[in-house]
Amino acid sequence: MQYKSKSFFRILRENKILLLMLLPATIFTIIFSYIPMGGLVLAFKNYRYADGIFGSPWVGFQNFRFLILSGKLWPITRNTILYNLAFIVVGMVFQVGFAIILSEIKGRRFKSFAQSSMFLPHFISWVVVAAIAYNIFSFERGVLNNFVRSLNLDPINVYNNPDIWPFLLIFFKTWKGLGYGSVVYLAAITGIDQEMYEAADIDGANIWQKINHITIPSIIPTIMIMLLLALGGIFRGDFGLFYQLIGNNNILLPKTDIIDTFVFRSLMSSSDMGMASASGMYQSIVCFLTILFANHCVKKVDPDYALY
């Protein structure tokens, strides 16, 4: 018996409701993700406002050359990678851990309260977080130094100590993203077949054995997908986090400056659109290559865990 393949227009008619639901997201992606890609041409031009994007003269790779010769390319790239690796590892450990803890809590009211409390920081802007940090760590009026002075000890000048800030940035990033990230893993845990836990109970397994042999292995595919998605943005820093908490503090910049903040400051100080575009293009290319390499490595180990 032969089956005729459906025509393209028939498929459209049969799935018109689903396609209409998809339409807003498609339009949003085209407008804010694909159309702006035309601006990448600025990376190869000496942009002049009077001439516009396509009327400005070509300069080839001159903007990339300036970025390399500035001496900032390696430090900001190193900082961006190291911070994002720390954010990914620490964030994932805490998110998975808290998701497992929440899944084991039996009290419904306490569980709902804990989830709401963890999720709340996600909705707080980095401007507010920066204000909280300043009120805690301010040299003259901060809560920390007021407590230190009450003990007759010397106050700590946190905003003049670059060595402290990598730990503070990791803490604030983890704290703010903990609740949102835990929801994904909690959903994966909820989808685990409960019969496996019942069988483990019959065999006399304790809670740690069930977590190690059932829960964690069952959510590994979700962990791998989230890891690959995070690696795709490893060269893209959280601009709000770094700019709001650090700002233009030159003392802290050697250990806290990332590609995003460097591009922003360069654009604000020199209005050099070409160099800023070259930095953004470099960032996008290395992000794309990173996700390809990571997905290739995962596919070699286990194709089921790869994105494609």
Image (cartoon, grey):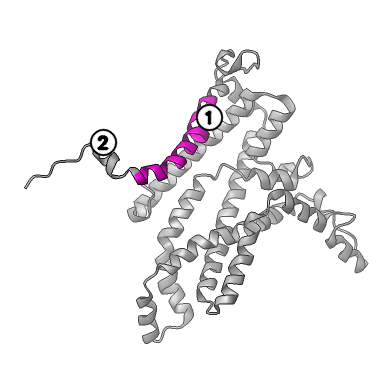
Image coords of residue 56 (percent x, y): 59, 14
Q: Position of residue 60 (x, y in %)?
A: 55, 17
Q: Is residue 212 left or right of residue 109?
A: left
The residue singled out by tag 2 in the image is: 9
Nearest to the observer: residue 232 or residue 9: 9
Q: Is residue 194 above or below residue 294?
A: below
Distance between the Cα atoms at labels 1 and 2? 30 Å
Q: Position of residue 38 (x, y in %)?
A: 51, 25
- On the question of residue 258 being in view, the answer is yes
145 vs 182, left or right, is right
- The vertical placement of 270 against 26, above or below, is above
Quadrant position of residue 178: bottom right
Residue 229 % position (x, y):
48, 49
* 10 Å crowding of disc 1: few (<14), some (14-19), many (20+): few
Does 35 lie within the magenta span? Answer: yes
* Front of the two marks 1 and 2: 2
Q: Which residue is mark 1?
A: 36
Q: Which residues are magenta?
A: 17-39
Q: Residue at x 48, y 63 (%)?
A: 185
Q: Residue at x 67, y 58 (%)?
A: 171
